[in-house]
Image (cartoon, helix red, strand yellow):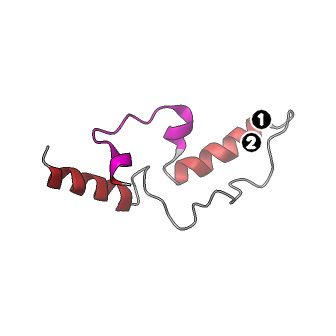
Amino acid sequence: MTEKQHALDVTKALTDASSPYFLHSSNQPNHSLVDTPLNGDNHTAWWRAISRTLNAKSKLGFVTDSLSKPKNDIAIAL
């Protein structure tokens, strides 16, 4: 793959809203994804809520380890 093709692939991964690597301005580390924090009694309900949220943001694959490794090293472009 040429350097130009690599740059295009990385740019698409970071700017395409359907890409799991896309970061929207609402994706903040201090932002609460679900209303109720996880405790010992609510795991099933919490998992359902968090998985729906992460799926809607195309981020569930990072947690379930179902996201395949990218063909190109996106971190190099960052």
Q: Is residue 68 left or right of residue 54?
A: left
Instruction: Please tell me how crowded label 1 is: few (under 14), some (14-19), or many (20+) other residues with Cα within 10 Å.
Output: few
Amino acid type at mark 1 = His
Instruction: Please tell me how crowded label 2 is: few (under 14), some (14-19), or many (20+) other residues with Cα within 10 Å.
Output: some
| Relative depth, front residue between 78 and 41 | 78
SS at mark 1? Answer: helix
Instruction: Establish if 48 lies above or below 23.
Output: above
Magenta stretch holds residue 65: yes
Quadrant hosting residue 51: top right
Q: Which residues are magenta?
A: 60-76
Q: Report the disc number at residue 62.
A: none
Q: Report the disc number at residue 43.
A: 1
SS at mark 2? Answer: helix
Residue 50: image location, x then y, percent = 66, 46
Residue corresponding to mark 2: 46
Q: Residue furthest bottom?
A: 25
Question: In percent of the image, x 41 and y 60: which residue is there?
Answer: 17
Task: Tell me how far mark 2 sits from mark 1, CA to CA.
Answer: 5 Å
